Image (cartoon, grey):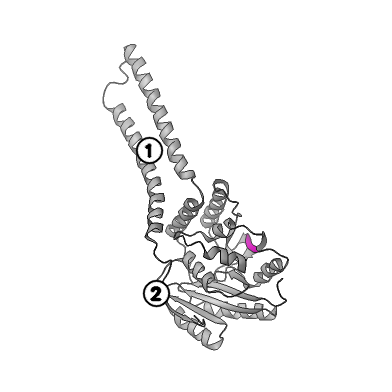
Amino acid sequence: MKNDHPTLSVVAPVYNEEAILPELYRRLREVLDGAGLTWELVLINDGSRDRSPQIMRELHARDPRVKVVDFARNFGHQIAITAGADYATGDAVVIIDADLQDPPETILDLVAKWREGYEVVYAVRAERKGETWFKEFTAKAFYRLIYRITDINIPMDTGDFRLMDRKVVDALKQMREHHRFMRGLSVWVGFRQTGVKYVRAERYAGETKYPLKKMVKFALDGITSFSYLPLQLAMYLGFIAAGLSVLGIIAAIILRLSGSHAFYGQASTLVSVLFLGGVQLICLGIIGEYLGRIYDEVKNRPLYIVRETLGFDR
């Protein structure tokens, strides 16, 4: 049974957010204190190159509820979320982006559902303000694709903004895979889950930390972590190429026997070789993606290296 005033940990990965951090702290404090919650804010410095580390130190000095985990270098957004969950001590943990696109006020809706007995409460983006049509289209396409090809039902139009009960966080701590897709892992563990709709705001300041290159890598991590479909597609391509080759051989024999000169010359041979070579390279590339991920897991390196922590006993 949860008490009336449970401890809430809010985890926010930070990478070059000097213009946003004071406002993030102000709004979180206003919302959480106003609701009478006991809370801590765990800021993960993911190798920031601006004044973000200094601002985090100042916030910690002003309010000991602000705690800092300082990475030795940039390890990535998903790893920063993982570290925040590792260090958080609350009965429930909220993951939120530091750019204020995820409104802190929505946390109260997540907490309300948690108090009803749900152990994972994810925030569903009913509307996305300030985003280009390309970003919005690709995001919607990705969520619908991964929903259909994975073995688990990852909710559509959800990001990492969610609340997780302590039992869920402890379960996630057991999974130390390197290519992490946290919004998939939090569904994979099970427990009682529900969603809360909200309007995603425009970025408060600064620029996005997810350009197209990172978006593609993130999508590949999500797909390869929870689906074998790319490997199955490689097999299907092989069968299709073999089938076409057999049909081509039969057609060539018939045309030769009938006296046709359609297959004389090198053009048809070159086209066939290039087609089969392309299919083979595609299949090798797909296999290579999975093999590279296996190699990363076998090395068994730590997920992150911490330079310093502020506000933790350990």
Numbered label attached to residue 279: 1
Q: Whole-percent x and y of residue 21?
A: 52, 78
Q: Residue at x 67, y 76 (%)?
A: 6
Q: Residue at x 46, y 55 (%)?
A: 221
State whether residue 18 appears in this view: no
Magenta range: 119-126
* Mark in the foreground, 2 or 1: 2
Q: Quadrant of residue 91?
A: bottom right
State whether residue 32 appears in this view: yes
Amino acid tagged 1: Val
Q: Whole-percent x and y of residue 268?
A: 31, 27
| Kind of element beneath mark 2 | loop
Q: Is residue 121 magenta?
A: yes
Q: Whole-percent x and y of residue 178?
A: 44, 61
Q: Residue at x 67, y 67 (%)?
A: 110
Numbered label attached to residue 72: 2
CA neighbours of label 1 inside 10 A, class few (<14), some (14 to 19), many (20+)? some
The residue lying furthest to the left in this view is 265
